[in-house]
Amino acid sequence: MHNLKNMITNLDTKIGRQFALFIQILIILSLVSFSIETLPDLSPDVRKALRYFEVFCIVIFSIEYLLRLYYAPKKLHYIFSFYGIIDLLAILPFYITLGIDLRSIRVFRVFRIFRIFKLMRYNKALNHFKDAAKEAKEEIILFLLVTLILLYLSAVGIYFFENEAQPDKFSSIFHSLWWAISTLTTVGYGDVYPITLGGKIFTFFLLIIGLGIVTVPAGIVASALSKSTKVNTPSDE
């Protein structure tokens, strides 16, 4: 029982590292299998083999989830934790769709992609990123709030500049939001664009602001990531 607990909860032990490696390989293979399933010309035998492999993955992930729940000091804390939710989402769609034609509820199959987040448990670099996100949580929330306000103001502005000239493309503020999103993120699909002088000038200034919107979150996360790395790196002194 002690070895079983170490296997599940202690990555510093040999058996814990071996189990972690096995789970990581299984996650990657399950995602490869998920991708292969989308190929249109698969033979029935291949689809059957992939289905059996999916069942095998579900059995292993289910056992892992139950063991983690069993050995968790605080059961509810694990259930509602980030990794607890990810572990559950990795297996729940399979049980929900048992005996049901998956073709009619394909959305449940997409939930299998959540397995990729299970890899974060075993990767120190990704854990640093998670810590950095927590460190910069208030700044990120503020940035998102400011971005939403800018999006709305941009949609309102371009609507008043372009509505009369292009009523089919800027028929309402809600329709103008698509243009605002693509412009502020500097994507600029080119399917909708201003033709009035006021609209063009407005767009010019919006593009300048958009460049800042793209770079600001990267700076926030990079700064928090640097702090997180320093905190988690042991001192040489």
Image (cartoon, helix red, strand yellow):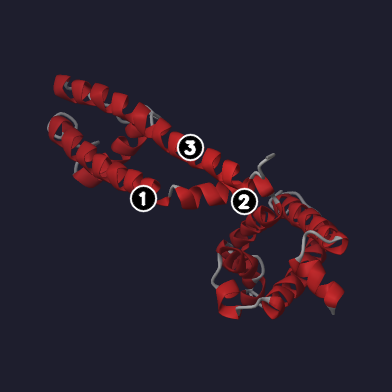
Vertical side of 125 occupied by 191: above or below: above
Residue matched to label 3:
223
Mark 1, residues whose alpha carbon is within 10 Å: few (<14), some, or many (≥20)?
few
Give the percent coordinates (x, y) of residue 25. 80, 54
Whole-number angstrom distance, CA of label 2 to CA of label 3: 15 Å
Label 2 with label 1: CB-CB less than 8 Å? no
Amino acid under disc 1: Ile
Vertical side of 133 occupied by 68: above or below: below
Identify which residue is drawn at 74% across, 76% down.
67
Identify which residue is drawn at 86% across, 59% down.
18
Lateral position of residue 99 relative to residue 209, left or right = right
Mark 3, residues whose alpha carbon is within 10 Å: few (<14), some, or many (≥20)?
some
Give the percent coordinates (x, y) of residue 36. 74, 50
Amino acid under disc 2: Asn
Identify which residue is drawn at 33% across, 33% down.
184
Mark 2, residues whose alpha carbon is within 10 Å: few (<14), some, or many (≥20)?
some
**Which element type, helix, strand or loop, lies under badge 1?**
helix
Nearer to us of marks 2 and 3 is 3
Q: Is residue 195 visible?
A: no
Q: Quadrant of residue 78?
A: bottom right
The answer to which of marks 2 and 1 sits earlier in the sequence is 2
Q: Quadrant of the C terminus?
A: top right
Mark carried by residue 127: 2
Mark carried by residue 141: 1
Whole-number angstrom distance, CA of label 2 to CA of label 1: 20 Å
